[in-house]
Image (tube, helix red, strand yellow):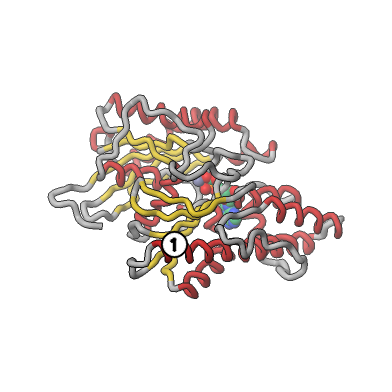
Amino acid sequence: MQPVPGARATMVLGIETSCDETAAALVERHPDGTGRIIANVVRSQWEKHRAYGGVVPEIAARAHVECLDELIATAMAEATISFGDLDAIAATAGPGLIGGLIVGLTTAKMLALVHAKPLIAVNHLEAHALTVGLTDRLSPPYLLLLISGGHTQLLAVEAVDRYRRLGSTIDDALGEAFDKTAKLLGLPMPGGPAVEAAARAGNPGRFALPRPMTGRPEPHFSFAGLKTAVRHAALAVAPLSTQDVADLCASFQAAVAESVVDRTRRAMAIYTESNPASSAHHLVVAGGVAANAALRQALTALAEAEGYAFHAPPITLCGDNAAMIAWTGAERLARGLIDTLDAPVRPRWPLDAAASPALGAGSKGAKA
Ligand code: KG4
Ligand code: ZN
């Protein structure tokens, strides 16, 4: 990224409340386009939702109200700055659960109004997409595999604010498939980390599960059938021993990795064809499921084989956090992309407005 002549460093407060994590962070962006996290606090609500086996929107919204002010105060205190020192206030405006979005965006609007600061209404998916700018100093263009609890997409990231969707899931999101698989095997929520932990002691070759969509020309995904195949395999050997559960998790994860690698390889071919001039291509994986070590390993090998450089944010910045919101706010501020105080919350907010509606957004739908 080119340095902006004469520009100074900017400091942005970020707020994230789109699902079940309440978060506040302060990020500094330097004139050369690099950034630094000054404070980053996240509070998970999982204990409040555990008994229900999933995120309850009303409980989530109330929990955000209860602790957001405190988390913002903690972040500000950690950074030892006051609101007057900020250059902008950024909050997730979508996609996500409407109650939580209203809590975060309204708080940001109030702070922006009281302290006369610019407001940036951030798309949560753009924040996942741009995290590597903060962690790896990587700026667009790059190919992005976005895998989270509510979305599974392959996108050409052409520039800040410019995205082209190449493929998406036709049913469940990948994180959702991990969560549902965990639930049916009696593992605790959130399911992704539990499935990954159980899989470590398992045999990935024991159960022959499908590799959905492999070989299809369009780089779309599907995970609903795989989840059903896990159910049938589990029923066939029930009652399940700890080893059965481990083998099912390992077999599921192996099937997921093969399917995701095949779909990403297909997207790489399309991406390379439409970006022939670019010398070095980059593959970026982001979103909560990007924390999965088996997937990271499989994607690293794929990137190496295809001549792409591979990037993944550190595990702590894969899941939902406010540092990515603050950073996206800073990136948008640097380009004059500022919002007005009547900016709406957008429970559904595709990154690629020109693309046809996503074939399937997962049953959690709007969640990112
Ligand atoms: O991005 P994120 O924190 O929230 C959304 O915006 O959805 O992603 C959460 C999802 C959950 O479905 C969770 O089970 C999954 O990411 N996840 C994982 C792992 N860690 C979190 N899935 C697989 N392996 C993991 N290690
Ligand atoms: Zn997310």
Front-most of 240 and 248? Answer: 248
Q: Compare residues 45 and 254 and report the one nearer the observer.
A: 254
Q: Residue at x 73, y 70 (%)?
A: 205
Q: Residue 283: percent from the left, percent from the top? A: 44, 63
Q: Residue at x 71, y 56 (%)?
A: 226
Pointer 1 residue: 271
Q: Nearer the viewer, residue 43 or 16?
A: 16
Q: Is residue 255 visible?
A: yes
Q: Position of residue 185 (x, y in %)?
A: 75, 52
Whether residue 316 is visible to the viewer of this picture, yes or no, is no
The amino acid pointed to by label 1 is: Tyr
Kindly indicate the quadrant of the structure image that contains residue 69.
top left
Towards the viewer: 101 or 202? 101
Which residue is situated farthest in the left direction here?
A: 6
Label 1: element kind: helix
Q: Is residue 73 left or right of residue 241?
A: left
| Residue in the image at 30% along x and 25% along y | 113
